[in-house]
Image (cartoon, rainbow, N blue to C red):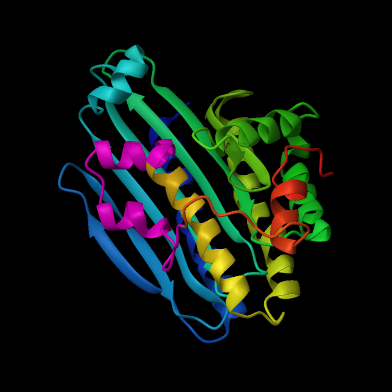
Amino acid sequence: MSDVTDARAVESYLRGLQNRICRELERLDGEARFVADPWQREEGGGGVSRILSDGAVFERAGVGFSDVYGSQLPPSASAARPELAGRGFRAMGVSLVIHPRNPYVPTAHANVRFFIAEKPGEVPVWWFGGGFDLTPYYGFEDDVRHWHRQAQAACAPFGEHVHPRLKSWCDDYFHLKHRNEPRGVGGLFFDDWQEGGFDQAFGLMRSVGDHFLPAYVPIVERRSAMPYGQREREWQALRRGRYVEFNLVWDRGTLFGLQSGGRTESILMSMPPQVAWRYRHEPVAASPEAELLEKFLKVRDWV
């Protein structure tokens, strides 16, 4: 493969994806606009973090593009992958987290990324990764089924085996091991993906990126005008606490970014603006809050 040409194609796609998603989220919100915050990494590379705050629909939305490189990986990464030791690397991706104002609109996360490590005289090591997952505060079967149908459609051109594999991967990854509970209702997740060669793997990454808006926008449009009160906002803040726990304890992207000298503000832009914890809080039996835990935060076939 031509590494330079292919890397440029990936970079072009990712920058365009960031632009498309930001435009659509601004349209949905109707009031707030993204503020662009370009940044440079001293060790090499940089990116653009775009943040929308205090909107009519979105309390905070962050859509970041990064393209970083260096002469060597952090020790934790090269220890896990010995074949990467002594190689220069380049890692680029788009990552987004959307925290809605209305508790009936779920939080959504998506990420698509490309990694390549090179050493003179040796074949490059590369892979793609990404996915998207949904974290509702109140459960609606129509929304969750729609989300998973779009996830299935994203995988369909690449073989019948791909969607079940990526769904299961997502269910396993977005799991709070210290609480033994899912973070949300899942979606897709993949990493270290080389299946079918570069063009095929790049195609899967693009398809996942392209299906995020069709998966999320109809849910936002259905739920953003629903009335809510203090009870729903308090529950939303409690469940956001689980989101923070996962990102700080288990998320590999967060850990890699911090360990590789990434920009802290951009890495942590995924955090919700308001969060709460209560000691041993349990929702009222047979309440909509209890239904989320008992019916929706379970691994199941939604399609």
x, y (%) of residue 123? 39, 16
Residue appearing at x 68%, y 53% in the figure: 211
x, y (%) of residue 264? 26, 52
Q: Identify whether 65 is placed above or below 33.
A: above
Residue 134 drawn in magenta: no
Residue 267 drawn in magenta: yes
Locate residue 242 relative to residue 37 in the image: left or right: right
Q: Identify whether 228 is placed above or below 288.
A: below
Residue 131 location, quadrant: top right
Which quadrant would the C terminus be assigned to in this image?
top right
| Residue 271 visible, this angle | yes
Locate residue 233 relative to residue 288 in the image: left or right: left
Residue appearing at x 62%, y 36% in the figure: 170
| Residue 102 visible, this angle | no
Residue appearing at x 25%, y 47% in the figure: 45
Residue 181 location, quadrant: top right
Q: Identify whether 62 is placed above or below 187.
A: below
The part of the chain drawn in magenta is 249-277
